[in-house]
Amino acid sequence: MLSPEIEDFSTSHARECCEIAKENWTHRLSKVYNQRIVSYFVNQCTPEKFIGSSRKGKIFVARVSQKVIGFVAVKFLEKKSLEIARLFIRPEYQNQGIGSLLIRYLENKYRNIERIIVRSAQLQETVNFYKKNGFRIERELERKVNDEVLREYLMVKKVK
Ligand SMILES: CC(C)(COP(=O)(O)OP(=O)(O)OC[C@H]1O[C@@H](n2cnc3c(N)ncnc32)[C@H](O)[C@@H]1OP(=O)(O)O)[C@@H](O)C(=O)NCCC(=O)NCCS
């Protein structure tokens, strides 16, 4: 059983976080999104963008020795809600409890939060992962990305 350290994102993590996001877009999320959507998001993954988004919300990374094996990016919304903006685990470390650990970490850290929301990809293993962690599907969402329609689920977990 892996027991990674969880720590605040710093600029030194940006390159690895980028690599993890790109790998997931290319090898996992490409099962449900077409090539144009995948390319759009792969191109969005730059160290500069990670550093920018770490200033708008918070990013936590899971690390084993000196290697980043996953991360979660969150935003704080009104009404005591937290949004998981991105949650990615390195493909070779998936299904070993790291994603669940990051969610538990958020719940323990932000104890005043009443609900956590996520716009989940409509990928079976991802939806199952969130359900297993206490989220339920509230509704389907559609958003436009470069003239393509991206379908996601709004998933919610009530923590109080
Ligand atoms: C979804 C994700 C964050 C889950 O993190 P994880 O560390 O792999 O998940 P955990 O080990 O904590 O949880 C395991 C559960 O998740 C689901 N799951 C995770 N990976 C899976 C896989 N490769 N195949 C099938 N189910 C999987 C299952 O429900 C599993 O429970 P089970 O073993 O009892 O069936 C991670 O797999 C990931 O980065 N996926 C690709 C990117 C993605 O979809 N991110 C979310 C964007 S909204």
Image (cartoon, grey):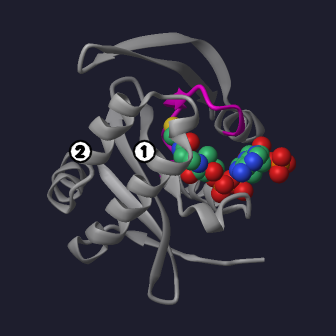
Q: Disc 2 on helix, strand or loop? A: helix
Residue 130 image offset from top left, x and y in percent: 67, 37
Q: Is residue 81 left or right of residue 12?
A: right
Residue 153 image offset from top left, x and y in percent: 55, 20
At label 2, the amino acid type is Gln
- Please name the residue shown 48% across and 28% down the image: 33
- Local packing at callout 2 (Cα closer than 10 Å; few below 14, some 14-19, many 20+) is some
Give residue 86's mark.
1
Q: Is residue 112 left or right of residue 35?
A: right
Q: Residue furthest bottom?
A: 65
Question: Taking 14 as reference, is 155 above or below it?
Answer: above
Question: Taking 126 as reference, is 34 above or below it?
Answer: above
Does the Cβ of the disc 1 residue fall within 8 Å of ligand 1?
yes
Residue 97 image offset from top left, x and y in percent: 72, 61
- Local packing at callout 1 (Cα closer than 10 Å; few below 14, some 14-19, many 20+) is some
Foreground residue among 138 and 92: 92
Q: Is residue 154 left or right of residue 144?
A: right
Segment tinted magenta in the rendering: 110-125
Give residue 44's mark.
2
